[in-house]
Every structure is written in C-alpha cells, then in structure tokens.
Image (cartoon, rainbow, N blue to C red):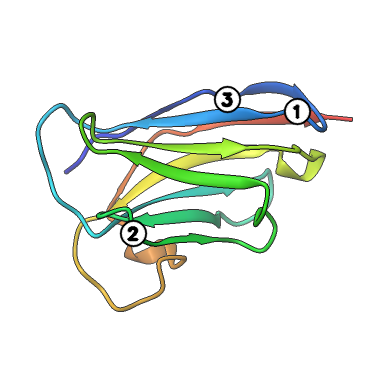
Amino acid sequence: QVLLAESGGGLMQAGGSLRLSCAGPGRTFHAQAMAWFRQAPGQEREFVAAITWDGRDTYYADAVKGRCTISRDYANNAAYLQMNTLKPEDTANYYCAVRMIGSSDPLSDRSTYEDWGQGTQVTVST
C-alpha cells in the first residue's frame, strides 16, 4: 500500500489559482500513473487529471482542460495539480491516487487506482 497525503486546498475566489500537492511515501516505488480526482457533495468522484509514471503523457477532464496542469516530482515521489482560472464548479474535495498495476484501461477510470489519499478541500467563491 502506498500512503498519499494531499495538501494545498483552501478557500479561493473565482479566477484565482492554487497548486495542490500530493506527497508519496519516502521510499522509492514504481507505478503506472498518478492522478487527481475530485468529489463534490452529493456527486460521484470524478476524474480531473492523470500523468503517466514516466511523465511523458498527461490527460485531463474536459472540465479542466486548459486550466489545469498535472506534474510529477520524481525525487520526492510527489505529484502536483496547478489550477488556474478557478470556477465555483471546481469546489470539491480533491484526491490523489496511484495506479500501481499496469492496465490498458483509461487513466480516467477511478476503479483502476489502488491507493488514495484523504483529500484536500477546495472551495471557490464567486
């Protein structure tokens, strides 16, 4: 099991920016991908962005494409989600996840991620 810890959430105004961080364990590990998902009250957890382990490929949900950038820090086993031009509909609890086992399923498929963090709340006000 890989322990993940998200941080960087908070109360923001629409149009602002923030960067979410996902800290992995101190030990070296290898996986297929890391991703960010989010869940708003009363809604299902939805895909936001993913990055392959080697960092070569990134994927984004249509709702955040052009506004968000996912990146990896190999030295620290970390991942980041830079969010710009925040909108009230971005309000949600944001979760970091790791897909350890290789799969041909889309990286947006949350059922294929084995390890999750506890989440960090992002609230965007008008």
* Image quadrant in which the N terminus is located: top left
* Mark toward the viewer: 1 or 2: 2
Which residue is under mark 2? 56
* Mark toward the viewer: 2 or 3: 2
Residue drawn 68% across and 29% down? Answer: 17
> Would you identify the image quadrant in which residue 88 lies?
top right
Ranked by sequence position, the earlier of labels 1 and 2 is: 1
Residue drawn 40% across and 66% down? Answer: 107
Whether residue 30 is situated above or below residue 79 in the rendered picture: below
Left or right of residue 30: residue 108: right
**Which of the pair 22/58 is nearer the observer?**
58
Q: Residues within 10 Å of mark 1 (few under 14, many from 20)?
A: few
Measuring from the top left, give residue 4's x and y in whole percent: 30, 34
Query: From this viewpoint, which residue is outermost toward the right?
Result: 126
Residue drawn 19% across and 30% down? Answer: 25
Residue drawn 10% across and 37% down? Answer: 28
Which residue is under mark 3? 9
Ranked by sequence position, the earlier of labels 3 and 1 is: 3
Whether residue 106 is situated above or below residue 9 in the rendered picture: below
> Would you identify the image quadrant in which residue 51 lies?
bottom left
Left or right of residue 29: residue 63: right
**Which of the pair 106/118 is nearer the observer?**
106
Q: What residue type is labelled 1?
A: Gly
Measuring from the top left, give residue 27's x and y in whole percent: 10, 31
Measuring from the top left, give residue 60's x and y in whole percent: 55, 59
Which residue is under mark 1? 16
